[in-house]
Amino acid sequence: MTTVAQSPAASASGSYVTSQKTIRSWLLATDHKRIGVMYFVATSLALALGGLFALLLRIEHLTPGPTIVTALTYNRLFTLHGVTMVWLFMIPSIPAAFGNFLLPIQIGANEVAFPRLNLLSFWIYVVGAAVVLGAMWLGALDTGWTFYAPYSAQSPSAVVPTLIGIFIVGWSTILTGINFIVTTHTMRARGVDWMRLPLFTWALYGTSIIQVLATPVLGLSLLVVMCDHAFSWGLFDPTRGGDPVLYQHLFWFYSHPAVYIMILPAMGVVSEIVSTFAHKNPFSYEAIVYSTLGIAFVGFLTWGHHMFVAGMSSFDAGAFGVLSMLVAIFSAIKVYSWVATLFRGSIVMATPLLYVFGFLLLFMFGGMTGVAVATMSLDVHWHDTYFVVAHFHFVMVGGTLTAWLAALHYWFPKVTGKMYSERLGTLGFALVFGGFFATFVPQFLLGNGGMPRRYYNYPARFQTLHVASTLGSWVLAAGMLLTLGYLSLALVRGRGAGGNPWNSRCFEWRTQSPPSEKNFDGEPQLSLGAYDYTTPWRTVQRTQ
Amino acid sequence: MLEIFRTIFGLPPGASSFADGVDLLHLFVITITLLGVFVITLFTLVFVIRFRKRPEDDSTPRVRANGKREALMTFGTLALFLLWWVLGYRQFLVMRRRSEPADTVYVTAKQWMWKFSHSQGQIENDVLTLPVNRPVELIMISRDVIHSLYVPAMRVKQDVLPGRYVTFWFKPVRTGKYPIYCAEYCGIEHSNMIGQVRVLTDEEYRNWLNDAARARPLASVGREAAVKHACLSCHTVDGQKHLGPTWSGLYGSDVTLANGDHVLANAAYLTESMMDPASRIVAGYSPIMPTYLGSLDPAETAAIVEYIRSLQDAPLHPTVPLPEPQALPVANSPARSDMDVRP
């Protein structure tokens, strides 16, 4: 009972951080929290690297011709930027780092279902990432992160080693997915039935389903590309009777759902934070849960909208167009629900909520321009231009990265027990948000003007907008560096955060921060709902 | 108003018959998007100010979603999205299905250049010269990897695939020079695979044709190619039925296929029949023709199509008449005439 009432700060029994102190105890930890933290460090390094590639690309675009790198280096850089950001950061960032840490606590469990598999999944990720990045020394590859055949089968760069790395990382994704699904099914504490699960857990559950179903298709397609490249199989090579468009179907069958692997956990984060800082139940818990499942399902049926001009029949194109409209509606439902959650709440502004508002604004732009590019005649003009680049960066960076920062600021006290400076948090948000806008709004205009993506040289009339975008990227980078700075500082000498600094009622805040090795002392008391804010806290304490 | 919109949103001039429609839809979609984002942001701001935490607050009422209102919001938004789709798909079909007769240009893409072969025999590299106000159909193939022909001013883009002919069409409505970009990443010089559409007035275009008329008439080149590749061993040019359908009067005719479908014998269909003969067999013939993919180069293909086109008005009846079959005694003539009625 005391666990619910007091949400104590780190108790005498110690926390998962202090229980064991050797490096070995971290590297071989089976504790889901430690694995989550290790994933966080690893994926953050990937983010830094991917960000560095992005900055170099932006600097290259300061002038229309060659600026700092050669065409070949440029082509490798945008490929590496995509590969690093998609597979090494976006896909594992929220699920494998925050998900690992929080999922068991949010369902009142003391572990995931397969702790050793969890550790294996982390090390598979590390090995895969090392192979991908190691391939840079062999020359990396210049195909773009989409590896379109038949170019990928002919490219004179290190296609095979890079793809092997991504293939390996895929295994880690699948194992994490299986682990989360089984954990959610079998490890829920007494009283936590499905419709009482925290929304972040629901989001992770939906994500895991996609991971398990879609990733094998990617693995197989990449395997075939490797064989095409290494042994001239020719499955996607028309000169040997293969079909290059088949590759695109297979690739997007994975990669469109992969977009939802990246955005669903972000949506889960937003659901949690809105409710906590509005101090109110979500406007419609059911709507958010069912739209999560809706996205996970319909997301599998929309891949063809990447191929409207690829040589598909008009009928197929139309079908994929209308299905894409259906998947958009689930995101709209979520946005309405988040905003309505604020209604009659008791709203406290803090850095995590600022990031969530940033998310809302950017994600709405990203989502609506997504519907715009699914409007088929418009896509003919926008396809493969900077408009599409801006659109998916609004979703991936404006959405996922912003939500990742929100999650980081929201759960930082949970994971470390420390608190950061709110003032620097606000400043960091202003820089990230402003920098993001300045970087990507010009790219919408570039796309309108017909600037194709993946162009090393570009016509001089596009220069002004390119320079604006590059300047924006520097502001964004400054914001990220500032955030890294003050969070590191808080880690070393931040003040104690207390058990539940945000006054949240969600299950993970019903234990001490940082949590003990077993998450809860004794059986977790979760009879009060995760979003039940109708009872004043003092009354709850008295009745317990 | 469209011009103001184009200026603000950085759109290129609209030089094809598609451009105005596409840009109007663009304006509609982007206005709704901005409006939607504005309204939702406004609600967020109002809520944040109106419902900010007050010291006495420790609990909040449980607000339950109003099902009717939720359904209205959901289906209202869905209806809007579907409206966009209907409008967009209709325009898309217009782009995909050519409704007017058009000139044909064969396009060969390769790393890293565009080659345009006109049916009058002119061949251009990286420049595509067209007359204004005349629809043009591009029949395209790539010699290596996937490219994508993108003409922003025409609002058209189509991937160019190796091993398969794809077609699209547009109608330039403004004279001028408009850039062509390759939009599908194709290797190190991808960003230099650029070109230009040059739209001329009728008179300028005729002059250009005359200047460029050093080339032989394409139909005669086509006849030579047809002889060289032994096309004429199976196809006659005088209306006679042989192993394959006659070329006489074939171009532009309605062809009944073995599966009962009908197809218009245009450049696209004839090209497909050379490259992938088995895909659409004419009714009454066996699928015995081998593929000519790889053995006919695009210029020859264009020339043969042009040759077939030149036979469009050739006599439909054989010049050497076959002996008339003797009329058999007709037993049941009404039934026969029933069978002649096309379904």
Image (cartoon, rainbow, N blue to C red):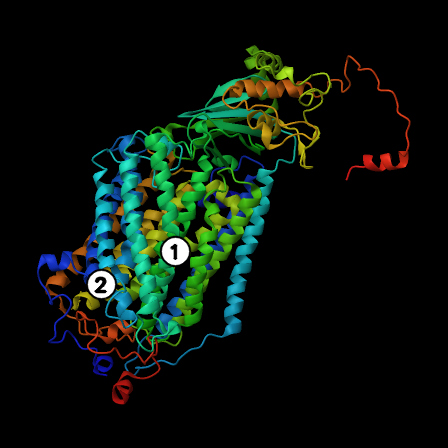
How far across and how far down the image is residue A151, in percent?
A: 38, 32
- Judging by the rendered image, the residue that carries numbered circle 1 is A210
Amino acid at pointer 2: His
Residue at mark 2: chain: A
Q: Is residue B134 visible?
A: no
Query: How many residues crowd around disc 2 within 10 Å: few (fewer than 14), some, or many (20 or more)?
Result: many
Amino acid at pointer 1: Ile
- For the residue pair B288 and B6, the one nearer the viewer reads as B288
Q: Residue at x 23, y 42 (%)?
A: A131
**Callout 1: SS:** helix
- For the residue pair B80 and A331, the one nearer the viewer reads as A331
Quarter the C terminus of chain B occupies: top right
Q: Is residue A480 visible?
A: yes
How far across and how far down the image is residue A283, in percent?
A: 41, 72
B292 relative to B145 in the view: left or right? right
Quick one: which residue is furthest to the left in this view?
A22
Specify the label residue A32 is tagged with: 2
Q: CA distance from mark 2 to mark 1?
A: 21 Å
How far across and how far down the image is residue B321, in percent?
A: 80, 14
Query: How many residues crowd around disc 1 within 10 Å: few (fewer than 14), some, or many (20 or more)?
Result: many
Q: Residue at x 72, y 20 (%)?
A: B241
Whichever of callouts 2 and 1 sits on the residue coming sooner in the sequence is 2
- For the residue pair A286 and B241, the one nearer the viewer reads as B241
**Callout 2: SS:** helix
How far across and how far down the image is residue A248, in percent?
A: 43, 41
